[in-house]
């Protein structure tokens, strides 16, 4: 819930004065551009767009406050997976424990 409020706080300068019916694809593209200008990655922008679209979909379908919600495509994200516990190119922190786990040994 705290992260939801944080994401919506980033969108507030662009969406704060608008009525729900006024939010459309060009407005959301402005939100994306403003968020990219802060130096974040595509995944962070996608989370913001997903949050806004989910909220607009709920306004349209569940509560019937608006006729329809705008559809937005997600941005392309890099396919490379990053392990935050180690740097790229380093070996895992505890390889012996990993080997024990593979053999099914119980760690005490």
Image (cartoon, rainbow, N blue to C red):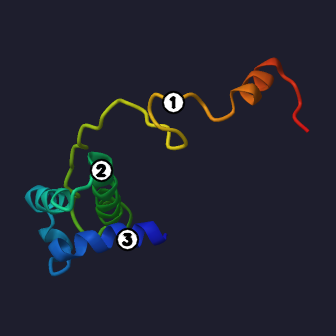
Q: Residue furthest bottom?
A: 17
Distance of label 2 from label 3 (alpha carbons): 14 Å
Q: Residue at x 80, y 24 (%)?
A: 100
Q: Which residue is mark 2?
A: 46
Q: On screen, 12 above or below 24? A: below
Q: Residue at x 20, y 72 (%)?
A: 20
In the image, taking residue 57 as reference, residue 84 lies left or right, namely right
Separation of residues labelled 1 and 2 (CA atoms): 29 Å
Q: Bin the neighbour count of mark 3 within 10 Å (Cα to Cα): few under 14, some 14-19, many 20 and up.
A: few
Provide the residue designation for mark 3. 6
Q: Which mark sits nearer the N-terminus, 2 or 3?
A: 3
Mark 1 = which residue? 90
Residue extending farthest left: 26
- Name the spot of residue 82 as percent of width and height, x first: 44, 37
Q: Where residue 33 sits: x, y (%)?
A: 13, 57
- Which is more N-terminal, label 3 or label 1? 3
The kind of secondary structure element at disc 1 is loop
Secondary structure under tag 3 reads: helix
**Displayed quadrant of residue 58:** bottom left
The local secondary structure at tag 2 comes to helix
């Amino acid at each position: 819930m705290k992260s939801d409020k944080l994401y919506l706080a980033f969108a507030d300068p662009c969406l704060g004065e608008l009525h729900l019916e006024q939010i459309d694809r060009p407005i959301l593209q402005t939100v994306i551009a403003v968020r990219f200008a802060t130096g974040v990655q595509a995944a962070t922008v996608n989370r913001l767009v997903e949050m806004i679209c989910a909220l607009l979909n709920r306004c349209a379908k569940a509560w019937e406050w608006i006729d329809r919600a705008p559809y937005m495509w997600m941005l392309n994200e890099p396919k490379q997976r990053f392990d935050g516990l180690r740097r790229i190119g380093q070996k895992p922190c505890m390889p012996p424990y990993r080997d024990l786990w593979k053999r099914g040994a119980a760690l005490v």
